[in-house]
Image (tube, grey):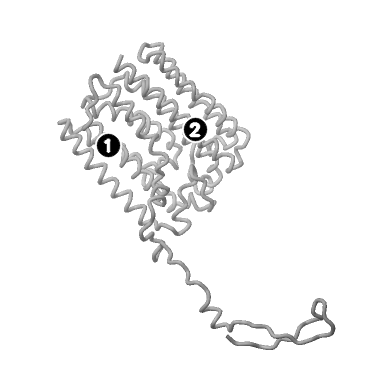
Amino acid sequence: MSVREVPHPGPLPGGEGEEPYLVSALSRGEREKSRPSPRPSPEGRGGRAQGAPVRTWARALRVAFLPASLLPYTYGALLAQGPLRAGRFALGLAAVAATALSANAMNDYADARAGADSQDPEYYAFFGGSKLIQQGRLCPGAYLCAALGLAVVAALAAAALAWTLGRPGALVLFAGALGLGWAYTAPPLRLGYRRLGEATVFLVFGLMAVGAGAFAQTGAVPTLRVLALSAPFACLIAAVLVANEVPDAAEDAAAGKHTLVTTLGARRGYLLFSGLAAGAFAAILGSVAAGWLRPVALVAFAGAPLGWRAARILRWDWAEKRALVRSSRLALGLHAIVSLALIGEALCSAWW
C-alpha cells in the first residue's frame, strides 16, 4: 500500500489553519487487483447461451402460450365417442406441443430478421417478442435450431400417431399445421405481414387444434359438429393475438408488418377484439340451441367480465404498453376459462 501526503484544500472541521494531513490510498494497480472478478457470462461468442437456464428457454419458446394450444386439442379428444385412448392422446399432445413451440421459435427468429422486435428493447412478456436476441442472450441461430429440433419432435410424434391409427393423414394434418405456423412470419409467405396472421392463428390454433384432438382418437375426418364446436377456441385465440397486436402496432408498421390492427389503427383494435370475443360466446349459444352442447356449457360466460375489462383497456389505454400487459393477460385468462368450461361440459356429456 502506498501512502502520499495531500494538502487539505481548506480548514479541517473544528480546527484552525491549513494543516497538512495524511491520506491512505491504494495504488492504481492495487485497486484493479482488489476489484472482484466479473462473473462469467452465460452467453458465449455471438450471443450464444451456454448452459442457458430453463427459464430463459421457457421465455424464448413462449411457453406461457402453450395451454392455448393444448386445451383445444384436449377438448377435441373429448368430443370423440367412447373412452379416451390414452396412447393416441399422448402422441397427439406431444405433436401439438412441439408444433406450437416450433412455430413460436420460428416466429421470433423471423421477426428478429425483419426487425419487427427491435424497435422497443423492453420485454413485456406477452407481446413484442422474447427480446432475448435483441439483448444478446441468445443468437438467432439458437432459435432456428430450436425450431428445427422441435419440428423433428413433432414429425416423430405425428408419425407414431399415424402408425398407431393406420392413417397417414395424421402426418399431413400436422405438417400442414407446422407449415402454417412457420409461414406466419417466415418467408416466403410471411402471412402475418400480409394481414393474414389473424386468419392463420384462427385456423391453426383453433379449428385445426380441436380437429387434431378428435382425429387422434378416431382417425376420421372431423365432422361439421366438431368444426362448429371449435369456433369458440378459434375466435378467442385470434382475440389473444389482436390484444397483443395493439401495443405492437407502431413497431409492426415501422417494420412493414401489416396486421389487421395496423390496418384499422391501434385506437380501434378494441373493436376487433370485442367482435372476436362476442363471436366466441355467440358460437356457444348457437351450439347450445342446436343441441350440440348441454346448457352447462353456459358456465363459459363466467369469463365474459375478463373480456369486458380487456376491451376497456384496449379502448382507453391503447397507447400505454404497460397497461396493455393487463389486457393481454386478461385475454389469455378469458381463453383459459372458456376452454376449461367447455372441457368440463364434454366430460359431463361423456360421464352422464
Please determine whether, in this image, residue 288 is positioned above or below residue 138: above
Q: Position of residue 185 (x, y in %)?
A: 40, 44
On the rendered structure, is 291 left or right of 303? left
Q: Which residue, given by chain and number where applicable, does mark 2 sit on?
A: 331
Horizontal arrangement in the rendering, residue 266 relative to residue 42 (left or right): right
Question: Where residue 309 sits: x, y (%)?
Answer: 57, 29
Q: Percent x, y for residue 260?
A: 50, 35
Label 2: which secondary element: helix
In the image, is residue 313 above or below residue 348?
Answer: below
What percent of the width, then of the height, locates residue 269?
55, 33
Q: Which of marks 1 and 2 is in front?
A: 2
Kindly identify the residue that appears in the image at 35 percent across and 28 percent down: 207
Please name whichever residue, 95 or 50, is drawn nearer the observer in this view of the structure. 50
Label 1 is placed on what type of residue? Answer: Phe
Residue under label 1, please give it: 174
Task: Pick the quarter of the image with the N terminus.
Answer: bottom right
**For residue 345, what is the image quadrant?**
top left
Judge left or right: residue 1 versus residue 97: right
